[in-house]
Every structure is written in structure tokens, then in C-alpha cells.
Image: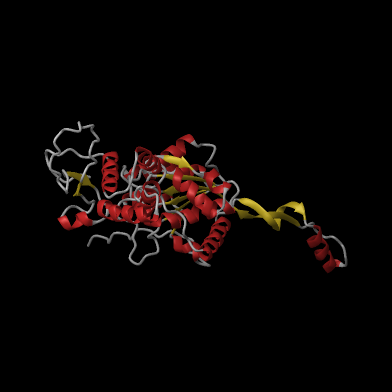
């Protein structure tokens, strides 16, 4: 980034990288075109916003000895460091440094007069940018949840599966219809001298649910993305037929990445697959796309789980219209809001207001950690009657 000025053009990153190599070269380090090419190839495979990775790439490609490591490290701190902040420039950083370019080697006749030598040499001003720890992330940090919390979230996902169960489990219960329960029938006959007075029947209890998870990965959810990823991973683990979609302005299915690997590996794969968490949210658009183009996905035994804070760049009414379509086909709709259990929370966001009539549950992430979470969604307070 160059200093502000109407006449000075903005330097490209490759230009600043070349200027840094020139600075190192003039500090006495033999940096050839091969080293510069290696550094250019290295920056293509690292996160440039990761200061430690970028510094390691510079040291590994430009320094060839322990002495040169110290020189390159000192030049790195001067060129890419935070010295520009003392100049009163913006937080993104900008500044200048004076370097001496390498002198071109020209053949001079032996009888030619030697010009007086300037010990400092001709100097040029090269613009450079500073690294900032507050710059937006180039991806998603989805891992890092403690193992104890992951186990608790998994148990909470099982409780939700039982609460919205539509599929039979392994255990049976009494029912007026179903197969004959021979053991219970014999036990009842003992009360009548061993005579079978009636056949008692049983059916599998509904213990399992099928989830369709909509996970908001927009910028407003950045501080909650690892927590929501743990919920999505747990819901996919406890339900065999679960489908997981990540959305911000586009809808991306991440089911195979969640099922293919463990939690740690899946966090890395999904973080590389989904869009950057820099844009806004299109909740209504994404739900409409799910409702219109996935008719065989959402059915009468499916529970739609929406992980979002409700901030939407689109029309709030579109969220309610999409949920109305999904409600007619789905078994239940659950909205998990990261602020739902905070003191003073009220569902005042437009998208959440339009969605409330169609929700069966409004949970927070904390409800997955509770033994007995609430079963009914909170409603908006009613307006006082006119006097």
C-alpha cells in the first residue's frame, strides 16, 4: 500500500515484494532471481494475512546461512513491520523506506577516469505496506472447541432428535396396532390362570429424527461460527439422513465433508470450501432456493434447523414466505439463534419476526448443553391495548 498522494500510483504487491528483495540484497545478502522466484511461489500457497507464515517464507527462501537469517529478519521487521503507524497513517498501514538499488555492472575502459564514489549511493523511496492483526480473515476458523463441549453438544443433538422424532428407534412400546408382544401377552395371561385373554401388541417407539440444517456463515456470525459448526457436525453425526447447507449469499452443501472425516479434519475441509465470511446474509433467498429446488429433500419426517442470528440484507417478508412453504412439507422448524438465551433478548430482527409464526422451537446454543431445554419458542410481547 502506498502513501496517500494524487500523483503517486498504488504499488502492486509483487512490486513491494521486489522492493523488499532489493532491500535485503543491499544489506549484503546474495538474493538472486531464483530466490525471488521461490519467494513468489511460496506466497501463493500461504495465507498472506498470517504474519508468522509470511515471515517464515521470506526467511526460508532468501537466507542461506545463520548470519543471513538475522539480516533478513531485521529487514523484514523494518519493511513489513509496524513502523508506518508512527507516521499517523491509517490502521492498514503505509510508509516508506530508503534503499539503495543494485548498481548495474558496466564495462569501463581502463583509461577512463574514475568518478568520485558516493559511499551512500543513489537512494530511491519505495512504498511498503504494514501487516495488521485486525485485518479480516481469509477463511473460517471452525475448530478449537474443547472436547468436553463437543460431547455435551452431541448429547444435546440427541435430545433434539428425540424431541422431534419421526423415525422408529430400537425400543418398542405398547400400541393398539402392530406385532404381537408375546412376552407381555404371556405375562397378562398369568392373571387369568394361564389363559390368553387378549393379544397385546407393540410398535417401535419414535426416537430418531431427520435433519436439514441451514447454517449461516456470513460476517455477522463470524464470532459464533466455530460454535455453530460444532452444532452442525453433531446434528449430522446423530442423524444418518441429515443434510447440511452453509449459506451467506450462496447456498453450499457441506454434508459429505462433515461425514467423511472427524471433527478436526472436517473443520479444515469445510472452512476451505465455504465462502469468505465478509459479505452479508440472504436468509430468505437461501430458504427459497431450498424450498423450490429441493422438494425431495424436505419431507414430512424432516426437521429444518436454521443456525442464524437473523440479520438479513434481503426483504424480511421473504424469509416468512419461504418458511411457510417449508412448514407445509416439514415435520418441524427449529431456529437456533446465538443470542436467544442472553438477558434482555427479544426477537426484534425483521427476518426473525416474520419467521416466528412458523417456528416450533427457538433455541440458543446453550440449550444443547442443558439437560432440560425449553420446548416452546418465545413470542414477541403483545402491544398494550389502547386506553
Figure quadrant of the N terminus:
top left
- Please determine whether, in this image, residue 228 is positioned above or below residue 293: below
Which residue appears at 25% of the width and 54% of the height?
Answer: 78
Residue 21, can we see it?
yes
Figure quadrant of the C terminus:
bottom left
Kindly indicate the quadrant of the structure image that contains residue 325: top left
Kindly indicate the quadrant of the structure image that contains residue 22: top left
Give the color scheme: rainbow, by chain, secondary structure or one colour: secondary structure
Residue 32 locus on image (x, y percent): 34, 40
Going by the image, does 188 lie left or right of 67?
A: right
Residue 354, can we see it?
no
58 or 12: nearer the viewer? 58
Going by the image, does 48 lie left or right of 100?
A: right
Residue 275 locus on image (x, y percent): 40, 43
159 or 254: nearer the viewer? 254
Which residue appears at 69% of the width and 58% of the height?
Answer: 171
266 or 279: nearer the viewer? 266
Residue 331 locus on image (x, y percent): 53, 48
- Please determine whether, in this image, residue 19 is positioned above or below residue 109: below
Residue 194 locus on image (x, y percent): 88, 65
Going by the image, does 370 lie left or right of 9?
A: right
Which residue appears at 55% of the width and 63% of the height?
Answer: 151
27 or 261: nearer the viewer? 27
Amino acid at each position: 500500500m502506498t502513501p496517500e498522494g494524487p500523483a503517486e500510483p498504488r504499488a502492486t504487491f509483487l512490486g513491494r515484494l521486489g522492493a523488499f528483495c532489493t532491500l535485503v540484497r543491499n544489506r549484503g545478502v546474495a538474493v538472486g532471481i531464483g530466490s525471488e522466484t521461490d519467494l513468489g511461489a511460496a506466497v501463493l500457497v500461504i495465507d498472506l494475512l498470517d504474519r508468522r507464515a509470511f515471515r517464515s517464507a521470506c526467511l526460508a527462501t532468501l537466507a542461506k546461512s545463520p548470519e543471513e537469517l538475522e539480516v533478513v529478519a531485521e529487514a523484514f521487521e523494518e519493511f513489513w513491520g509496524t513502523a508506518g503507524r508512527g507516521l499517523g497513517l491509517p490502521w492498514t498501514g503505509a510508509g516508506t523506506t530508503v534503499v539503495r538499488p543494485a548498481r548495474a555492472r558496466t564495462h569501463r575502459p581502463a583509461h577512463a577516469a574514475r568518478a568520485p564514489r558516493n559511499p551512500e549511493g543513489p537512494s530511491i523511496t519505495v512504498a511498503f505496506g504494514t501487516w495488521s492483526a485486525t485485518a479480516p480473515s481469509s477463511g473460517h476458523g471452525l475448530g478449537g472447541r474443547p472436547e468436553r463441549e463437543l460431547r455435551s453438544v452431541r448429547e444435546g443433538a440427541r435430545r433434539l432428535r428425540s424431541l422431534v422424532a419421526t423415525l422408529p428407534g430400537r425400543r418398542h412400546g405398547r400400541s393398539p396396532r402392530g406385532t404381537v408382544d408375546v412376552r407381555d401377552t404371556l405375562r397378562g395371561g398369568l392373571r387369568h390362570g394361564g389363559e390368553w385373554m387378549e393379544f397385546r401388541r407393540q410398535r417401535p417407539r419414535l426416537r430418531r429424527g431427520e435433519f436439514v440444517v441451514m447454517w449461516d456463515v456470513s460476517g455477522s456470525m463470524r464470532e459464533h461460527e466455530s460454535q455453530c459448526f460444532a452444532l452442525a457436525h453433531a446434528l449430522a453425526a446423530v442423524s444418518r439422513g441429515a443434510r447440511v447447507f452453509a449459506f451467506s449469499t450462496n447456498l453450499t452443501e457441506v454434508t459429505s465433508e462433515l461425514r467423511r472425516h472427524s471433527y478436526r479434519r472436517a473443520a479444515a475441509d469445510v472452512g476451505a470450501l465455504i465462502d469468505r465470511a465478509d459479505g452479508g446474509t440472504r436468509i430468505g433467498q437461501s430458504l427459497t432456493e431450498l424450498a423450490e429446488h429441493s422438494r425431495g429433500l424436505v419431507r414430512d419426517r424432516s426437521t429444518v434447523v436454521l443456525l442464524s442470528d437473523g440479520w438479513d440484507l434481503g426483504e424480511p417478508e421473504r424469509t416468512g414466505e419461504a418458511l411457510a412453504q417449508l412448514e407445509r412439507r416439514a415435520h418441524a422448524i427449529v431456529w437456533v439463534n446465538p443470542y436467544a438465551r442472553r438477558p434482555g433478548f427479544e426477537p426484534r430482527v425483521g427476518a426473525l419476526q416474520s419467521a416466528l409464526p412458523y417456528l416450533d422451537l427457538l433455541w440458543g446454543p446453550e440449550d444443547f448443553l442443558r439437560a432440560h431445554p425449553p420446548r416452546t419458542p418465545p413470542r414477541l410481547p403483545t402491544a398494550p391495548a389502547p386506553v
